[in-house]
Amino acid sequence: MNHAPVPADFLPLERGVDAPEPLHAGASQARRAWRRLVANRPALASLLVLLALLAAAIAGPWLWRVDPAAQQLGQASLAPSLTRRALLVADTEPPAACGDGGGLRVCGNAHTVAVRLAWDAVADAHAYRVYRHELAPRDAHDLGVPLAELGAGAAPAFEDRVGLEARRYVYSVAALDASGTMRVTGTLALAVEQAIPWSAARRLGLVDASERARIGSQLRLPAHPLGTDYLGRDLLARALHGARTSLFVGFAAPLACTLLGLAWGGVAGYAGGRLDDALMRVADFVVALPFLLFMILLRVAFGIAPGESGVAPLLLAMVLLGWPAPARLVRAQVLALRSQPYVQAARLFGAGTPWLLARHMTPNVLGVLLVSLSFAIPSAIFTEAFLSFIGLGVVPPVPSWGSMCNDGIRAMFAHPHELVVPAVLISVTVLAFNVLGDGLHDALDERGDTR
């Protein structure tokens, strides 16, 4: 039954368990956006992946203390492994007995440091050619890679030290007569054992000067969880150090673009009139500049020679040519906000331009800028990878994911892990940022919240 209000109805509510706590509007909106983001499982998973990548880039090089530029040519292009053993051999081995007769034969042990071959001389031979194949030759025109051509006066022997790996090889020797006709005189299939020279083992700290008696024994090599590249450099170390370079460029350039665009677009949208037209015509001019040409000109201006890394001109080019996009976005938002009733009311109450920009304009634009930034970061990472791939960004020995892809493309078919490792890191990072950007867009959209 309704009754007229009495003074007791207007008594202040005692603070207790059921009393609602006053919430700041901005804090309440941020909490609702965070709840929506957490409820979005793909976006949350992407956020966790990105945090893991950042943690690996920051702490990884401290935990995995391997020099990313250290070359071990005897362990080039190794597949990913945690345990690997190698035969310890002397830097200069004495001549090994090869025996007499029997056609093409191996002298001593066949290992990745050297494979010594000998064969019987052919009476009418004017020269010999030595070939190496990874498969059994099908005919005389399929003998593999030519390693050397020896004159008739040379000893019928050859030592192979070219890019040997622990795998099966088929060697062939062909004799050439006076007319140049080639005739295969010997074929030998053998398994090459992984080995490491004494000097390389000393550099790695696997042996000391008093352990020469261990030559000929097996040593346990350092682990390479992601394998090595064509120069024997550890891919895990290069991926961790490369993450610092790629993520630094990916975060620094978009953040600087966003801050510059926020100032430029905010002033243009709030001021309006001729100043707005002038500022936007400058932005249109910057958009028309070709990025690659501008990048090359900056490298020349910075004195970056061919084959040298140019992170500074890369960042400067991305910032100078990338700010118009966020500037236009901010200008459009400010143009829509400055005519809102609460902005007009604040102006009537005497609020100045700095207060309006700081209190009303910037907070309402940050959500849109945050979503834009989440999409700009993967674009910057991909741009750095592309420029490093074509030699205009980061070049060896400085590691980055793009330069690692450039190195890995050389051995894409023989050793795909050299290309797969950096390509997967770039793909996962770009995909995670894109999914997170979609999640942020949905989380910051108050119109889609029915709770």
Image: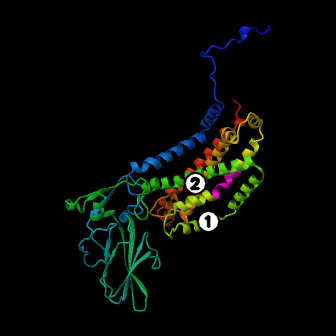
Q: Amino acid at mark 2?
A: Ala
Residue 382 shows in the view: yes
Mark 1 residue crowding within 10 angstroms, few (<14) / some (14–19) / many (20+): some
Q: Magenta residues?
A: 321-328
Quadrant of image for the C terminus = top right
User: Which residue lies under the disc numbered 2?
Assistant: 253
- What is the x, y in percent for residue 8? 71, 8
Q: Which mark identifies residue 294?
A: 1
Q: Which mark identifies residue 69?
A: none
Residue shown at the point (52%, 44%) measured from the top left: 51
Q: Horizontal placement of 142 versus 124: left or right?
A: right
Q: Amino acid at mark 1?
A: Phe
Residue shown at the point (53%, 57%) measured from the top left: 423
- What is the x, y in percent for residue 46? 57, 44
Under circle 2, the secondary element is helix
Q: CA distance from mark 1 to mark 2?
A: 16 Å
**In the image, residue 255 above or below residue 307:** above
Residue 424 shows in the view: no
Under circle 1, the secondary element is helix
Residue shown at the point (49%, 58%) measured from the top left: 400
Magenta stretch, main secondary structure class: helix
